[in-house]
Amino acid sequence: MNGLALILARQRAAFVVTACLLLGACATTPPPQTIDPETPAEVPVAQTTANPLAIYDPLEGLNRRIYRFNALADRYLLMPVVQTYRKVTPGFARAGVQNFFSNLGEINTFANSVLQAKPTSSAVTLSRFVINTTVGLAGLWDPATKIGLDQRNEDFGQTLGYYGVGAGPYLVLPFFGPSSLRDTVGLVGDQGLFYVIDPLQLQDNDAARWAYLTMYTINKRDTVNFRYYQTGSPFEYTLVRLVYMNYRALQVEQ
């Protein structure tokens, strides 16, 4: 590991510790007000109507500034790159890239399925990973879906929610977009697991690591249809916040 990589590793470790301390502090904060407080506790989340103005967002001013920064970065940096990528890359190749990264994501899904004691999800995810990695040529093809093994979606943020950790305050992360304190810690946990396992052996290969990160970012943006300030709503920030928090609440409940 070279000097720069060592510094980055130390910074990541410091961030993990800081995030864990923040999560501990989160345990003493009020629960996220994503659901009308008058709603009886026995009513499932899917049958409730959240109050968009009651979501816990103490850093709203900063979040809004980061939201605008993300919109500018998306418009002038990410989307031009993605549009060029779409022009020069055939559809089947883009699908292969998407399948490749999706297959790698099965590692975190499997780990979090196990942590949440979901045997069916764990078995399906493990089967998908084995089939797609072998028959699917390192994940470039997705034969597992064709035989009925549908992809599951589990992450460490959902695992924390499964064990009762509250969402905490709503956050907007630079480049990553909508999140919460719990999901930010979950994101660090998932990335940390991937870093430790290092399935592609990237830690000692700077060129391969940067190539991976570049393609990961391009593919991630290519597969997300959302466009900033094209919702038609003058309250887009509030709308995105509402949709995100309720979507995550539903994912945790499932």
Image (cartoon, rainbow, N blue to C red):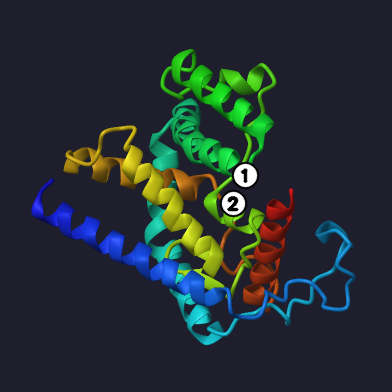
Image quadrant of residue 13? bottom left
The mark tally for this picture is 2
| Residue 243 higher or lower than 36, as above or below | above
Q: Where does the image place residue 242, in percent across and percent down from the top left? A: 70, 70
34 with respect to 133 (left or right): right
Q: Secondary structure at mark 2?
A: helix
Of residues 159 and 75, the one nearer the viewer is 159
| Residue 83 higher or lower than 27, as above or below | above
Report the residue marked by disc 1.
116
Image quadrant of residue 240? bottom right
Task: List the single residue furthest toward the left.
Answer: 3
Instruction: Name the residue: 48% across, 50% down.
Output: 221
Quadrant placement of the N terminus: top left
Instruction: Name the residue: 55% across, 43% down.
Output: 112
Q: Do the numbered discs 2 and 1 sit on residues whose CB atoms are within 8 Å?
A: yes
Q: Which mark is residue 159?
A: 2
Which amino acid, by three-letter code, is at mark 1?
Gln
Q: Where does the image place residue 19, in percent across and percent down from the top left? A: 42, 68
| Residue 121 higher or lower than 203, as above or below | above
54 with respect to 40 (left or right): left
Disc 2 to disc 1, how far (Cα)?
Answer: 6 Å
From this viewpoint, is residue 79 visible?
Answer: no
